[in-house]
Image: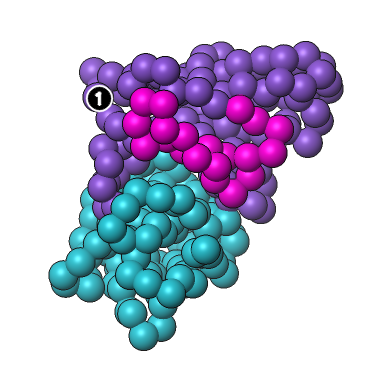
Chain colours: A purple, B cyan
């Protein structure tokens, strides 16, 4: 089944404790992206990647890191999480091309205490 | 940089009522436009998209949207909503010619009352 998977789905952590949220897709998509969803703010793009080893900042990259060492994986790293990073995070992937449909993962709900 | 505005934050309709959700974007060039839907507890999924050609686009589940270039708008419509349309709807835009930043609107929560 074609899908985007994220792990973990739920995470409670404390300020400053490094964490990684994994994202994997099995559709051979070149493009992958991370978003955060906050009430009243919609989805905001954190980082995106056009292909392996090619990443770029979205609208809200501060406090996050990403890497794209393999085509299928695009982990999101919070080196020192803070409470303002409490949010619902979505990973998405698509083929490259402006009008391609993005396929979204199920989301990771993060609480930073 | 592009931006997207969705003016309706929360809409409540009775079943069989007609729906129109507003979406306006700001960008100096040509764009691709999308409507995504998030049903309760589910992933975001594509409803419809516009990238060229006929400005009236039809999507899944009876939804359609019209791109009006002069108004920078891409409003979503459905002639008769059902309870199962209860969801959050997001408009999104990205510049044509390359898959750069994708910008989403703040979303509209639609509640359909049986």
Q: Residue at x 59, y 49 (%)?
A: A59
Does the magenta run of residues contain A52? yes
**Residue B107 visible from this viewpoint:** yes
* Residue in the image at 67% along x and 23% along y: A78
Q: Is residue A20 left or right of residue A99?
A: right
Q: Quadrant of residue A82?
A: top right
Q: Position of residue A81 (x, y in %)?
A: 76, 24
Q: Tell me if residue A82 is in the magenta stretch.
A: no
Q: Relative to the observer, which residue lies in front, B67 or A69? A: A69
Place of residue A43 in the rendered image (x, y in percent of width and height, measured from the top left): 55, 46
- Whether B4 is drawn above or below B111: the answer is below
Q: Which residues are magenta?
A: A46-65
Residue at the farthest front position = A53
For label 1, the SS is: loop
Q: Along the horizontal axis of the image, is B98 left or right of A75?
A: left
- Residue at (45, 71) in percent of width and height: B27
Q: Residues within 10 Å of mark 1 (few under 14, many from 20)?
A: some
In-front residue for pair A67/A15: A67
Residue A58: image x %, image y %?
Answer: 54, 45
* Residue at point 55%, 42% (across, down): A57
The residue that disc 1 covers is A27
Is residue B42 visible in the rendered image? The answer is no
In the rendered image, the residue lying farthest to the bottom is B70
The furthest residue to the left: B53
Residue B27 in the image: above or below residue A52: below
The picture places residue A74, in percent across and down from the top left corner, at: 45, 23
Q: Chain of mark 1?
A: A
Q: Is residue A13 above or below residue A44?
A: above
Q: Judge by depth and name the residue closer to the eye, B95 or A43.
A: B95
Q: Up-down: is A57 above or below B55? A: above
**Nearest to the observer: residue B47 or residue A105:** A105
Q: How many marks?
A: 1
């Amino acid at each position: 089944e074609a899908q985007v998977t994220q792990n973990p789905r739920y995470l409670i952590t404390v300020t400053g404790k490094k964490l990684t949220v994994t994202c994997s897709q099995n559709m051979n998509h070149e493009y992958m992206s991370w978003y955060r969803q906050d009430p009243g703010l919609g989805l905001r793009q954190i980082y995106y990647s056009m292909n392996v080893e090619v990443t770029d900042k979205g609208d809200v990259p501060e406090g996050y890191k990403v890497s794209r060492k393999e085509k299928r994986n695009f982990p999101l790293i919070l080196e020192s999480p803070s409470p303002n990073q409490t949010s619902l995070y979505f990973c998405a992937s698509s083929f490259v091309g402006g009008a391609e449909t993005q396929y979204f993962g199920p989301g990771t709900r993060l609480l930073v205490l | 940089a592009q931006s997207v505005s969705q003016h309706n934050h929360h809409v409540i309709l009775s079943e069989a009522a007609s729906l129109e959700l507003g979406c306006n974007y700001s960008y100096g060039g040509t764009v691709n436009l999308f409507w995504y839907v998030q049903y309760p507890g589910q992933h975001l999924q594509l409803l419809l998209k516009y990238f060229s050609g006929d400005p009236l686009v039809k999507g899944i589940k009876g939804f359609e949207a019209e791109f009006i270039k002069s108004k920078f708008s891409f409003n979503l419509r459905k002639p008769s909503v059902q309870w199962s349309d209860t969801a959050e709807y997001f408009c999104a835009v990205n510049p044509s010619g390359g898959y750069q930043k994708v910008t989403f609107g703040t979303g509209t929560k639609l509640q359909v009352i049986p």
